[in-house]
Image: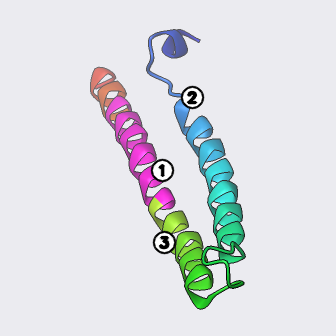
């Protein structure tokens, strides 16, 4: 409990994983909606389908990279805390 209030134990990684999951669903649903969106007024076109697929594929890839980058910072913090504890016990 002492580490929690001293901000040595981070709870944010769990929240980031939840945010990733919600973002993944949002990007995927948005891309699928965009695939069937009638932009030109002439019915569903190839451009809408390709753009929707690109949103699903690249949007989710970029979202994953962004979330992993944030989690990496917390993992580095955790490893540095472990090193500090190891050096204190030496």
Mark 2, residues whose alpha carbon is within 10 Å: few (<14), some, or many (≥20)?
Answer: few
32 horizontally vs 2: left or right: right
Let me know if residue 55 is in the magenta part.
no
33 horizontally vs 52: left or right: right
Tell me the chief SS of the magenta region: helix
Which residues are the magenta region?
63-81
Instruction: Please determine whether, in this image, residue 65 is positioned above or below residue 73.
Output: below
Which mark's residue is nearer the viewer, 1 or 2? 1
Q: Position of residue 32 (x, y in %)?
A: 70, 71
Instruction: Please determine whether, in this image, residue 35 is positioned above or below residue 76.
Output: below
Whichever of callouts 3 and 2 sits on the residue coming sooner in the sequence is 2
Secondary structure at numbered mark 1: helix
Q: Which residue is mark 2?
A: 11
Residue at 60% x, 80% y: name it. Answer: 48
Q: Which residue is mark 1?
A: 67
Q: Which mark is residue 58?
A: 3
């Amino acid at each position: 409990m002492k580490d929690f209030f001293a901000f040595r134990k981070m709870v944010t990684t769990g929240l980031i994983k939840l945010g990733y999951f919600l973002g993944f669903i949002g990007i995927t649903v948005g891309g699928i909606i965009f695939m069937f969106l009638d932009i030109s007024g002439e019915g569903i076109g190839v451009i809408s389908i390709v753009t929707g697929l690109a949103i699903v594929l690249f949007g989710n890839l970029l979202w994953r990279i962004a979330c992993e980058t944030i989690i990496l910072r917390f993992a580095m913090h955790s490893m540095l805390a472990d090193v500090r504890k190891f050096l204190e016990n030496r």
